[in-house]
């Protein structure tokens, strides 16, 4: 984590246990209060609070209102690091499936954003889509990010390709062969092929 964040010192399994106990006693927060609660948790200095905010959001990801995209974007762009952004990318993937108009609007600005974490999310949001992956869209977003020296972008490109290779290895091999990928992206994409 490169000492970027303060911690309470509670290990991840314990945070999960404490949250599970809290939810079993008090239940999940009402959906109309979740955005405010997640932003409040996000504002606290210790990292464990951001993990709790993500976990609460993940537990109701299939029920989030359309407007929750604003809080998801906030979480991506504040206190950003791979440990939160990659989980939020999954939640965004669920949200984009539910709300194609939100996907169209936000993906248009995220995929070419100066913020690397928004671009990383644009690359990774389809990780769980399997056969429903829009490979043309993925390739276009990857092409828009070619030439980047940013580790987290190049790693995401390779990860997205490696994941889709489970569905269509030939298409991924062909794309890797004809595309001038960063060596890290190429290695990651071809890891299991």
Image (tube, rainbow, N blue to C red):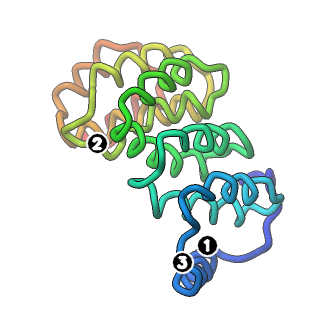
Q: Of circles 2 and 1, which is in front?
A: 2
Up/down of 61 relative to 141, above or below: below
Q: Secondary structure at mark 2?
A: loop
Q: Earlier in the sequence, mark 2 or mark 1?
A: 1
Task: Give the quadrant of the C terminus.
Answer: top left
Residue that label 1 marks: 12
Q: Secondary structure at mark 3?
A: loop
Whole-Å distance between the Cαs marked 1 and 3? 21 Å
Residue 43, given in percent of the width and then of the height, sits at 79, 53
The quadrant holding residue 20 is bottom right
Does residue 138 appear to the left or right of 174 in the view shown? right
Whole-Å distance between the Cαs marked 2 and 1? 27 Å
Residue 52, given in percent of the width and then of the height, sits at 63, 65
Whole-Å distance between the Cαs marked 2 and 3? 29 Å
Q: Of circles 1 and 3, which is in front?
A: 3
Up/down of 55 relative to 23, above or below: above
Residue that label 3 marks: 27
Q: Residues within 10 Å of mark 2 (few under 14, many from 20)?
A: some
Residue that label 2 marks: 129
Numbered badge on residue 26: none
Residue 109, given in percent of the width and then of the height, sits at 55, 19
Q: Earlier in the sequence, mark 2 or mark 3?
A: 3
Q: Residues within 10 Å of mark 3 (few under 14, many from 20)?
A: few
Query: At 79% across and 66% down in the image, what residue appears?
Result: 7
**Do the CB atoms of the residues marked 1 and 3 lie less than 8 Å apart?**
no
Query: At 57% across and 87% down in the image, what residue appears?
Result: 25
The quadrant holding residue 12 is bottom right
Q: Earlier in the sequence, mark 1 or mark 3?
A: 1
Query: At 31% across and 22% down in the image, what residue appears?
Result: 176
Up/down of 137 relative to 75, above or below: above
Query: At 31% across and 42% down in the image, what residue appears?
Result: 163
């Amino acid at each position: 984590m490169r000492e970027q964040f303060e911690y309470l010192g509670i290990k991840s399994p314990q945070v999960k246990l404490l949250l599970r106990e809290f939810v079993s006693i008090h239940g999940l927060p009402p959906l109309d209060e979740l955005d405010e609660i997640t932003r409040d948790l996000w504002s606290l200095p210790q990292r464990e609070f951001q993990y709790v905010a993500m976990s609460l959001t993940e537990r109701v990801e299939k029920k989030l209102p359309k407007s929750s995209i604003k809080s998801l974007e906030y979480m991506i762009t504040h206190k950003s690091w791979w440990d939160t952004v990659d989980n939020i990318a999954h939640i965004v993937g669920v949200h984009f499936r539910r709300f194609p108009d939100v996907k169209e609007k936000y993906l248009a600005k995220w995929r070419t954003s100066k913020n690397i974490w928004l671009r990383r999310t644009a690359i990774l949001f389809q990780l769980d889509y399997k056969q429903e992956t829009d490979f043309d869209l993925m390739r276009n977003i990857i092409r828009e990010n070619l030439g980047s020296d940013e580790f987290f972008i190049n790693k995401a490109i390779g990860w997205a390709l490696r994941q889709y290779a489970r569905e269509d290895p030939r298409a991924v091999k062909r794309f890797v062969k004809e595309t001038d990928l960063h060596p890290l992206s190429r290695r990651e994409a071809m890891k299991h092929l």
